[in-house]
Image (tube, coloured by chain):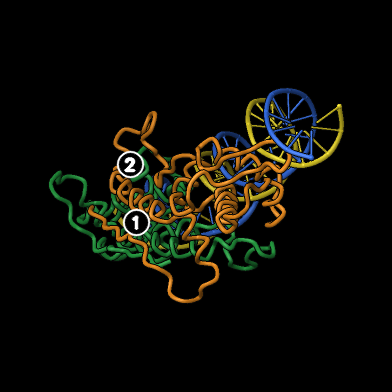
Chain colours: A orange, B green, C blue, D yellow
Amino acid sequence: MLKLTKKADYGLMALKYLAERPETVALSAKDIADAYGIPAQLLAKILQQLTRAGLLRSHAGMNGGYALSREAREISAYEVIHAIDGPFFITSCTKGAKGCELTPSCTIKEPLARVNDTIAGVLKSISIQDLAEHEHPHGRGHEVNALVSLTL
Amino acid sequence: MLKLTKKADYGLMALKYLAERPETVALSAKDIADAYGIPAQLLAKILQQLTRAGLLRSHAGMNGGYALSREAREISAYEVIHAIDGPFFITSCTKGAKGCELTPSCTIKEPLARVNDTIAGVLKSISIQDLAEHEHPHGRGHEVNALVSLTL
DNA sequence: TCAGTATACGACCAATTATGTCGGCGTTTC
DNA sequence: GAAACGCCGACATAATTGGTCGTATACTGA
């Protein structure tokens, strides 16, 4: 149904939370989980995935926790989603390992691959900073240079 | 994981198949299912959904089957997906009936709603005709006027 | 008018995926 | 060395998807 998993949502929320608090050294998984009322252990695993993907730095021990490994501006929503849910393809027949098993099948996937790329492009053009900024100023948002065109 | 269901894929494939054969009066679910090697009964249900949504016309009895109810150019991929998978939202907290249950949650969903609209726009700009046409001419495809911009 | 071919629809089951939990281990700080 | 933390893999459970079955209904043509 073309939607993000909750894990990806949680991940984005957590990064946004961190981006909004640039002064703090690190926040524990529990801190963030409590802030949003989401399962702490589940969020912990998600943050670990993001750490492995290089989006977060982690620090064990007391007063440890997680912090962004880069500027919020330099982390895209795409990276987060990709790190958590893996590479996404809009088509079911992902054409990865074995492609479509059925012979003449999926004459559909080639045009839809373009759509897939377009969506990925949009997601890549959105940074965590964008998500964090948008909160307060009800005024004009800024134009993301995601003027994607689509050639079929 | 942000992908179409197989049902939606099947639906698109079937409509494309019909679009490629404008001369035929009607094709049965079985004909189309056999052409792609997909379960006939499943495809039948999908085609019924599309019929209910007004994208297809059906006719029972011998030499019956399904036909496009409009020009292939006038049927968008969005309509097909919507008819089969229902309204899609990129965010898990759909903000529909009850929205996010958690109090300050999903401060994320508002910016992502824009992304959602963007994707929907792209899908709306693609017609079944686009899918069908693309097949043979290896030459230049045409530019779909889906120059979507995204203001956060 | 009857046999054959088709759609229509609901109930159901099976497979997959998503979500969440548990327990044990390694690290750092106080 | 104990408390607070991250790290990891194995489960368990819930939800969704994919697919099947049975039956009813509609239309066609001989």
- Image location of residue A92, percent across then percent down: 42, 42
The kind of residue on which mark 1 rests is: Tyr
Direction from residue B109 to residue D11 in the image, left or right: right
Q: Which residue occupies the foreground of this view, A72 or C10?
A: A72
- Image location of residue B28, percent across then percent down: 35, 50
Q: Which residue occupies the foreground of this view, A126 or B42?
A: A126
Q: Specify the subunit that label 2 lies on.
A: A
Residue at image coords 31%, 51%: B27
The kind of residue on which mark 2 rests is: Cys
Q: Nearer the viewer, mark 2 or mark 1?
A: 2
Residue annotated with mark 2: A106
Residue annotated with mark 1: B66
| Residue situated furthest bottom in the rendering | A139
Q: Secondary structure at mark 2?
A: loop
Q: Specify the subunit that label 1 lies on.
A: B
Q: CA distance from mark 2 to mark 1?
A: 20 Å
Q: Is residue A85 visible?
A: no
Quarter of the rendering occupied by the C terminus of chain B? bottom left
Q: Secondary structure at mark 1?
A: strand
